[in-house]
Image (cartoon, grey):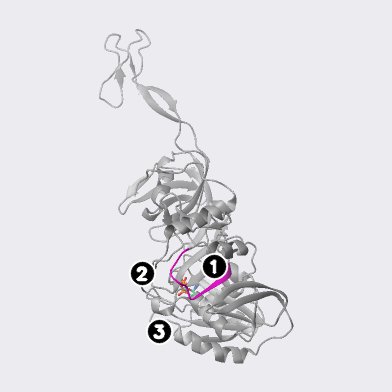
Amino acid sequence: MYISVDDTDSMRGNCTTFLATEIIRELDDLDLIGNPRLVRLNPATPWKTRGNGSLVMRFGRGSGPKRFIGMIGDRELFCFDSCTDYEPDPQELRRRIIPIVERNHDPDFSDPGLLISKVKPSQKFYWKGVRTILDREIIDPEIERIGGLTFEIRQGRGLIGCVCGMAWRPRDSTFELLTYRPRDRWGTERIFDPESIGMMDSRYGSTFNSWEPRYHKVAMVPMTPCPVMYGLRGDSEDDLIEASKDIRTEPIDRWVVFLTNQGTDDHIIKNPKALVPDQSYALRGNVASRSRHIEGGHTIIDVETSHGLISCAAYEPSKEFRFVLDWLNEGDEVEVIGELRDVPRTLNVEKIHVISAGPESVKISNPICPICSRTMKSTGKGGKFKCKKCKTHSFEPVMGQVRRQMVPGWYEPPTAARRHLSKPLKRMGVVQPVEFVNGRS
Ligand code: ATP
């Protein structure tokens, strides 16, 4: 039986992943089939709280080998990769889970949804959920088709995320080991040793987005008052469990390894027929303007694409990543990846592939007189140069080629400014050709 929950938290606190651990705690008479799943949906969804995550679990009777995937208090948590035909009673599950949702949601700022179903929704709902904006009217017939049982509070908008998250069949996937603080510590300052995270990061190459070597800063500990102590992301479940032992923090209450679609680029639409705001794209084109800097520390360039001229923005939090836009010249060929915003209509660049950087020339001197070989003087009128002696003139200064600062390759913002769904260059098997040091702040 599949269970999904979404939209229980707000900026004031709570966390739907924590609620998932509470459901797992309550259903201790059943087995977890596969890891609990943290499925990120369209990051451009206007009504998301933070990372637009939907939580999905499957419960039944496990068969075959089991894997150790967490601790909840003193209880060791296991999951099975296969299961028997037994299905728990959905009505009974609903009755047991509703009080947990009621206890663990923000009554003023959340729209919780709970979906229980033996059958998964069609896969297309995952792709719509991760790439487009959906209406409730599209979701409801699918819930009916699969015979899902639901529970909702307020508008129940969370059911959109429940359906789309449950519909995920991983094509690419990663893991996140989430640790949680005891309830009496929620909202207080988190105590941890940053150096232990830096050392863990260099020891375990299969982890990602934990540490920012450029600034020597931790990226895996949230700043919000939510119950999470840290989230450790990576490609290997075993490595995450080992690596977490090296991270020194205040005592934690529980931890669980989730299967996720984070770091997969699943939200990116390639070769779009048309561009719709609040969706994310990969677009190829030629740079059509030098960068301009706008208030707030943001940097913009224009790129001529097959969909017309698109303004592409690197925002202040992306720090040195903005240099990439500064170093591009008109004519350079790029592939920009990011979310299209409606007003102002800009592509918020989350990764850029500089495919080719053309030659760049600078003025070396004023023109040389073809008769006397002396350097001409500027007349100060319309870029005209003149030889005083021979009265010859020219508009063309002597130009020479310079070495471009821009090196073709892939560039990405620092860890803290990345989207959950963005595939890190590390996972793409590429290395940024230039690291920006001594950068702007
Ligand atoms: P957190 O990451 O902190 O758990 P969140 O960012 O996931 O919070 P929610 O509070 O879950 O934010 O709100 C997201 C809301 O958007 C949910 O109601 C969900 O159903 C809805 N939603 C998610 N994806 C889409 C989509 N593609 N189209 C329309 N609504 C969506």
Residue 296 is left or right of residue 329, and the answer is left
Residue 40 is left or right of residue 31, and the answer is left
Q: Which residue is mark 3?
A: 107
Q: Position of residue 21 (x, y in %)?
A: 53, 78
Q: Position of residue 282 (x, y in %)?
A: 54, 53
Q: Residues within 10 Å of mark 3 (few under 14, many from 20)?
A: some
Question: Which of 108 and 320 lies nearest the eye of the viewer?
Answer: 320
Disc 2 to disc 3: CB gap under 8 Å: no
Magenta stretch: includes residue 252: yes
Residue 232 is left or right of residue 394, and the answer is right
Tell me if I can see residue 437 in this picture. Answer: yes
Amino acid type for the residue under numbered disc 1: Leu
Q: Which residue is mark 1?
A: 177
Residue range in magenta is: 248-259
Secondary structure of the residue carrying numbered label 3: loop
Q: Which residue is mark 2?
A: 189
**Mark sitting earlier along the chain (1/2):** 1
Disc 1 to disc 2: CB gap under 8 Å: no
- Report the mark closest to the observer, 3 or 1: 1
Question: Which of 314 and 396 lies nearest the eye of the viewer?
Answer: 314
- Report the mark closest to the observer, 2 or 3: 2
Secondary structure of the residue carrying numbered label 1: strand
Ligand 1 within 8 Å, label 1 CB: no
Magenta stretch: includes residue 43: no
Q: Is residue 68 above or below residue 263?
A: below
**Mark sitting earlier along the chain (2/3):** 3
